[in-house]
């Protein structure tokens, strides 16, 4: 992804291997500060995932793969155990750990294996961009939620990949970015990424999205996913489900961009996806400052589940797929 | 409303007349600080409304009535002009100004007229509580949005009046409070009011409400309104419409509590309600601190419109009314 640094634009990944360390853009510091977080141990990597220094299902997968590489052959099993307990909802984490476990068993070079996993993920996102770009006609207005961008994947993004591709092709588009409380990944990360690329956009409160639909100011919704089941139900950042219901109510297409590594064909329906609940302070505080009534409790599910019937299509590296076609991926 | 101050609980109104001044709870300071804002001129009152030191359609009406009283008979016309340009969406402001204009024309005591307007509004809210209380069965779980409480009305509240009444009767209930970005009136004001009364509640991000519906954790939705048209469409704080769509999707009743002064029978449909847009900084900053990507634009409609077909019933001081009955109020 392009990052406009003081010395000029640079091409940066969300996470990479350098000098025997796992390094990543610290997403907690954006957009105020561009900081690199080095991780020198499996525990460093696990905590980076838990604290959301790195987040986004595919990027968590890449980070975990590098985490296993850091442990080396003898430490791989323990590393896989520890990293598998970081965040429960996203599918890619487990996909990446399975991949690394197979390489560890066959005695392969784990650093090279993790690099290959990361590179494959980047190519996958590039292909998602190619597959999804035709869905964005000239002058279209896209609504997205949370960050399914390069930061969430390694590079290109999932939901943002078709936007980047359409923009590269010179197509005019406008992106509505719902801010995505409680952690504001839309306002902080997606808006930052779009600004780096020069893609026109505006932020709005999550609750204001209904106004866009009612005024016919959204042509399509395009979001990412953390886990997609065999029936085509999917989990994504909390707030996604409301947008899917609104899109259906207003006859607006609702697209979900995700790599095949996000599909969990062993799980039949969305109800079976474990939904992480995070701390109450994410709701009652913003940037460490209390914003809610002191002493009031808060409910903070990090994800919600959208049923397959509200999905127009999935956009994958293999092309566009209707929800009822997901099951055929088993073959 | 009960406010638990250091010296013990006190009964306080949102706004009142004292020592020749309009005084109000400064709602911008809550929940961190309980502060009284004195207004000594019409301009003070207008700015208190514009800056949302006082907010909520009925409370704005009461405040404006006192503002006209402050101007006295000779200044009433100019005061009505200035106060009528503060906030466009809520109906009660214009209802209050019409009431005061009639009293000014007939040469009545404007301070007594404003006090009578305020007292009538409080009694109205008490009656809304009586009318709405039977809608809240033992053990029910209510979702509300923004603040339609005593702070928004003067006393008792509109949406909160039935909750207060049910609680007084010893009924067990639980209130889900959506935080209501951008200004967080749910997390800051409604949670504060419920805590003062000892009513069990939890705050959640606006986008997390879909999870409650999907998990069948909401028995009814109860919100206020800023303006209700003859067709039964209504404007309320942005984010209301999404909850109405979700409620319909899940077969959950959706109730709107409002005094008759909120009904605008001269306006036929919701599209004709002027929707205030407020500053981008309300979205891009929280408590004066930037939270979004610097330089990104924001869209900040303060209200949205919910169509009559999504409303189960209106709760007024005259009882419960279906949307198709609104028109009969003309008689």
Image (spheres, coloured by chain):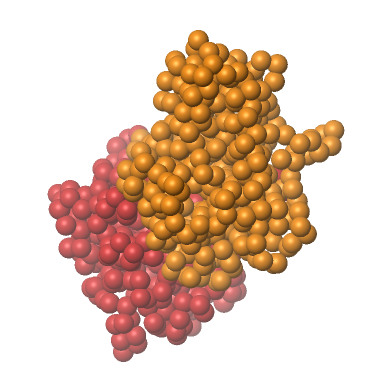
Chain colours: A orange, B red
Q: Is residue A15 above or below residue B110?
A: above
Q: Quadrant of residue B248?
A: bottom left
Q: Nearer the viewer, residue A215 or B304?
A: A215
> Where residue B318 appears, x then y in whole percent?
25, 75
Q: Is residue B158 above or below residue B320?
A: above
Residue drawn at x 14%, y 49% as measured from the top left: B170
| Residue A75 makes an appearance in the image | yes
Q: How many marks?
A: 0
Q: Nearer the viewer, residue A38 or B81?
A: A38
Q: Nearer the viewer, residue B293 or B126?
A: B293
> Where residue A71 appears, x then y in whole percent?
54, 14
A69 to the left or right of B263: right
Residue drawn at x 74%, y 48% as measured from the top left: A197
Q: Is residue B98 above or below residue B199?
A: below
| Residue closest to the far right | A7
B291 to the left or right of B134: right
| Residue B93 makes an appearance in the image | no
> Where residue B139 appears, x then y in whole percent?
17, 50
């Amino acid at each position: 992804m392009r990052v406009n640094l003081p010395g000029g634009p640079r091409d940066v990944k969300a996470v990479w291997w350098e000098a025997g360390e796992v390094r990543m853009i610290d997403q907690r510091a954006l957009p105020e500060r561009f900081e690199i977080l080095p991780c020198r141990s499996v525990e460093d990597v696990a905590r980076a995932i838990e604290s959301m220094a790195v987040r986004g299902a595919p990027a968590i997968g890449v980070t975990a793969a590098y985490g296993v590489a850091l442990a080396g052959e003898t430490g791989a099993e323990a590393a896989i155990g520890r990293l598998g307990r970081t965040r429960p909802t996203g599918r890619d984490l487990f996909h990446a750990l399975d991949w690394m476990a197979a390489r560890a068993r066959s005695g392969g070079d784990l650093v090279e294996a993790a690099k290959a996993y990361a590179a494959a993920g980047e190519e996958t996102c590039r292909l998602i961009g190619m597959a999804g770009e035709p869905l964005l006609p000239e002058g279209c207005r896209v609504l997205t939620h949370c960050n399914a961008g390069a930061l969430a994947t390694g590079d290109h993004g999932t939901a943002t990949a078709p936007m980047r591709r359409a923009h590269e092709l010179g197509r005019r588009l406008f992106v509505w970015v719902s801010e995505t409380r409680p952690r504001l990944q839309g306002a902080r990360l997606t808006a930052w990424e779009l600004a780096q690329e020069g893609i026109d956009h505006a932020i709005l409160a999550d609750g204001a999205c209904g106004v866009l639909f009612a005024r016919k100011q959204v042509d399509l919704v395009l979001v990412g996913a953390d886990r997609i089941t065999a029936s085509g139900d999917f989990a994504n950042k909390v707030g996604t489900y409301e947008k899917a219901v609104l899109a259906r109510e207003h006859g607006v297409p609702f697209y979900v961009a995700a790599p095949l590594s996000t599909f969990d064909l062993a799980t039949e329906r969305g109800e079976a996806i474990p939904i992480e609940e995070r701390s109450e302070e994410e709701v009652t505080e913003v940037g460490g400052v209390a914003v809610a009534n002191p002493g009031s409790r808060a409910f903070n599910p990090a994800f919600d589940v959208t049923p397959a019937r509200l999905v127009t299509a999935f956009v994958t590296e293999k092309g566009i797929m209707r929800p009822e076609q997901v099951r055929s991926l088993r073959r």
